[in-house]
Image (cartoon, coloured by chain):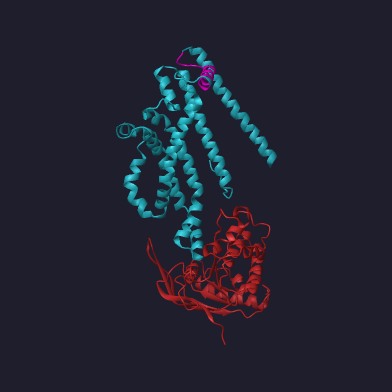
Chain colours: A red, B cyan
Amino acid sequence: MPAKLKVKAENLHKSFTTGEGRLEVLKGVSFGVKEGEFVSVVGPSGCGKTTLLKLVGGLEKPSRGRVTIDGRPPDPSRHRLGFVFQEDSLFPWRTVWENVGFGREVRGMEGEERVGELVGMVGLRGFEHCYPHQLSGGMRQRVAIARALAVEPDLLLMDEPFANLDAQTRWILHQDLTRIWEEVKKTILFVTHNVEEAVYLSDRVIVLTSRPARVKKVLRVKLPRPRDKLSGELVRLRREVVDLLREEVPYL
Amino acid sequence: MGRIQGILRCREVLYASLLLITVLLLWEVSSTTVRSSFFPGPREVLRSLSTLLTKGDVEGIRLHEHALHSLLRVLGGFALACVTAIPLGILMGLREGVYRSSKPVLEPLRFIPPLAWIPLVIILLSGYWRYLFVIWLGAFFPILINTMSGIKRTSPTLVEVSKSFGAKNRTTVKKVVIPSALPEITSGMRVGLGVGWMCIVAAEMIGGERVGLGRLILKYSELLRVDMILAGMIAIGIVGLLMNEILLRTERRLFVWRKEISL
């Protein structure tokens, strides 16, 4: 029996009204994410990846089409979602501990031990009482991941969480994220413009066209983990994705 | 690091005291050349200051009593300003519409100096309300403007984080918007207290009571005692400085999470 669909996006359209008129961002995007699956969305920069993620998370409403999580329209107060944002999203006045506990506080969840466990899981034991400005960029993103995991989400939505990190830190966090994903078995929808990252982490990679975005192709990555970033199969897939993106952005 | 900072700090203290001494010396020299009772030197003013502290003014009211009364009046007006300006600032920061629609009323009011209100206050208010109103006027706008801009400056990402966890608007305001605006609110309070303090002379001009630092210098103005006026002015300056220092230190302690340094 095939696994249950966690996320289902059907014919999503989204446009914004800007100073210069209507900006069409998404034009009929459809895809599904199965329970426990790790799916990445890649596309040319500015193609509407973040918008897509916000639609799935219920932070924005589609202009047309519909998206469902477990068969119902997304609603952050009903669904358990863990959002990880691209830019610095920690509360600067809260310590690491208090940041990780934020979502639990909002949702009225008991159990301080879980916060401690998660701080340990992302490798920040000993930094519980530090403020975000005392941490490096990589550590801050670990806190953001722990904060998202703290509400025991069954769907993690990650918006280029490693985009602003140096290559080395990103590499370490890739391995950590793979480990965490295997540990907690969550469904992950991961948005990135980094092809290597998408192919290395995911079960499937959704390639979008340039704006207004549609699904260009979906690739399956049938490789066991832990993966080798330089294995032949992975490099071949990377090439394939890059070629697809080149068709969209010729000067890439 | 600590040692270099220590040396820099020493240098700062040295320069500051050199400047102070130079100013005092120039003052002393010019007052001895002019030799007029309308131009007392620093030693005379110091003597008057100690007379005020020990024996009191012409009515026997001592300097610290004057200071205490002024302080209580300012704190009263300041408290009233906080209670009115902070909630209004939060509301105006959250709702663009409230700000826009109140703009034609609030903005011109902001540029009427407290001094310009005095004639009206004399007619309409009496007793303690006169002090309260004039100081409230001075403190209100800095607190309002800072609160509003602090609220507006909340990072949209942080608000989104809160929403992504399913937080209701009220929770988001309480847990994200207000904490993020708190440093600006308190710095608005500090500025407001300073401006309120600067309105003390204006308030005491019409307040009626014989006690208060503003009253003190007005009293001696009638007696043409420049030395006493200067002593009173210095007292006003010192009390204001001390209040600002105390608040600044509290702010620094409260907002250790802030990278930026407030001035």
Front in this rendered view, residue B114 or A142: B114
Taking A146 as reference, is B191 above or below it? above
Residue closest to the far bottom: A1
Nearest the viewer among A18 and B8 is B8
Quarter of the image where one finds residue B250 = top right
Residue bounds of the magenta highlight: B37-53
Query: Which residue is at 66% across, 79% downward?
Result: A224
On screen, residue A18 versus residue B52, left or right, reads: left
Q: Do we see residue B31 in this rendering? A: yes
Could you say which is closer to the camera, residue B2 or residue A154? A154
Q: Position of residue B3 (x, y in %)?
A: 70, 39
Residue B45 lies in the magenta-colored region: yes
Residue A162 shows up from this direction: no
Instruction: Indicate the position of residue A170 as horizontal and vertical percent values.
Output: 63, 64
| Residue under the point 43% across and 36% down | B196
Q: Is residue B230 left or right of residue A160?
A: left
Residue A80 versus residue B110 in the image, above or below: below
- Main SS of the magenta part reads helix
Nearest to the observer: residue B157 or residue A218:
B157
Q: Residue at x 46, y 57 (%)?
A: B173
Q: Position of residue A55 (x, y in %)?
A: 46, 70
Q: Residue A151, how many percent across, how many down?
A: 56, 67
Q: How many numbered tags mark residues here?
A: 0
- Quadrant of the snapshot with the N terminus of chain B: top right
Residue that protrudes farthest toward the right in the picture: B3
Q: Is residue B247 magenta?
A: no
